[in-house]
Image (cartoon, coloured by chain):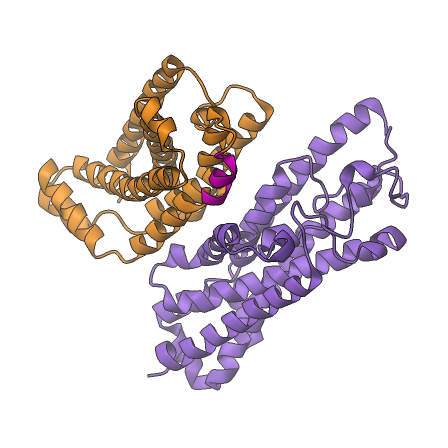
Chain colours: A purple, B orange
Amino acid sequence: MINYLKFRINKWSIILSLTIGLLLSGLQIIQSLIPMLKFGNLFLESPYTRWISIDPFNFSPIILFVLLPLIASIPSGNILKEDLDSGIFMHIKNKFNLNQIIFGYGLFTFISGFISIFIILTTNFLTYFMFLPNIKPDFLINENLLIISENTLLVELFYEHPFVHGLLSILLTSIWGGLFAILTCAFSIWIKGKFLSLLSATIFQIFTMLLNMFLKLPNFVSYVPFDFLRETSPSPTNIKVVFCATFITLFLSVTLLIIGRNKKIVW
Amino acid sequence: MFGKILKQQISLLFYDNSVILFSFIALLIGISPFQELIILKETKDWSSLLSTVFNPFILCFGLFLISLIASLNNDKFRLNDLLITKTRISITESIVIRTMLIQLIIWSIWTITSLITIMLSGLGFFILSANFQILILYLYAYFSMLLLSIMQLSVLVIANNKILAFLVAFGINCIEYYLLKIKIDYLIYYFTTPKSLLGISVRLFILMILSGIFIAISHKTILKKDL
């Protein structure tokens, strides 16, 4: 099944999603490095305080994290929908078990979303090591960024082992990229239009952003993905809320896939 | 012919279920500044009222994003109509009418709900004392939505790729938002901060002319295109 999907995936869609992400991350690198090359590294900045996920001063990180579901789901979020429409799904059904097929599609979309986000964030993180010295961030020197326990997950680890914290942040964001890809795949069985099904995860994120304005959790803890996925988020975060949101999204996408398998694909 | 195309597009739009989703999100965007407006009631400040009702972040990533997706959602003409009418103007007309109608639905729901929200939060005297001048700002918002979606249509006609057209229009939207933040001349988000009435009406005129130019560009490409 995986071998078929490796052959099936469209290479131009991978290139399109990677160009959007790499363009935004390159823009952020240029914007934040130009003043530093002009005046020198006055504030003892390090890669850990400058890379795209922690940067509060520029505009391109906001666009990247809002468009994260679209970037993750362009490579293979729409494959199941296209196969169902074109009828090649009937041909595959003769060769494999139906559960195996649905599991294969879900796993493949998760992996492709994971990898596309992982490449974009790691290239940005590692590029900064070519330009800036590898200094440990200090609470007093880097006070302007305000990295405190209110808005950062596992803040003790950030000041102790910043590289490990950065890698964990990249891992969480990549897992969410995969989740968004599965969500797109699950919604696409139910939605008729091809374009709307590709953007359904983006609309879902906008919907949670609007919902966050009415139904507020105690201490104004945010449950919107583009807030808590950044290493230092603009609003308060909590590790329990992050786990709950992850499990609810996973549960929603898996149940939508299973009900869709029973109602729409089998007849 | 124009009346017949209008009738056809309205009847097609009536059976489109996705409009319900977009209008529901527009309704949510209209109600969203309610809690901030109640806090604002004591200060009685005109400029902070404008910056909460026309919050640029919500406009950029909420309303304009939704309107861009909604105008790309469905096919806008059928090849049979081309064979019946025997002119290519009918394609341009049907595309533009469909886009304008969807923008009008989303915009009117957003406008009505946000006006009701201002009234309910106890700030209605601002609107009454200024002789409904806030309606001009809402009209400006409609024309900026229309300009973005018509730009998107002209890219779609040239490139035949929906994702590329969406990304180009959304990129222009984000560049305008960035220009608003660093306070260089900007066009689409001009109404979000208090300005003189003359400047707003001049830019409204510029917006109309620009959308006309983009309609003409897409008509010229449709004439030469292989359908």
Residue B171 locus on image (x, y percent): 50, 37
Q: Is residue A108 above or below residue A237?
A: below
| Apparent side of residue A70 relative to residue B191 in the rendered image (left or right) | right
Q: How many marks?
A: 0
Q: Residue farthest to the top?
A: B198
- Part of the protein shown in magenta: B34-41
Q: Can the viewer see residue A217?
A: yes
Pick the residue in front: A117 or B104.
B104
Looking at the rendered image, the quarter that the N terminus of chain A falls into is bottom right
Q: Can the viewer see residue A19?
A: no
Query: To which quarter of the image does residue A107 belong?
Result: bottom right
Q: Is residue B37 magenta?
A: yes
Looking at the rendered image, the quarter that the C terminus of chain A falls into is bottom left
Q: Is residue B119 magenta?
A: no
Image point 70% across, 44% down: which residue?
A52
Image point 55% across, 52% down: which residue?
A71
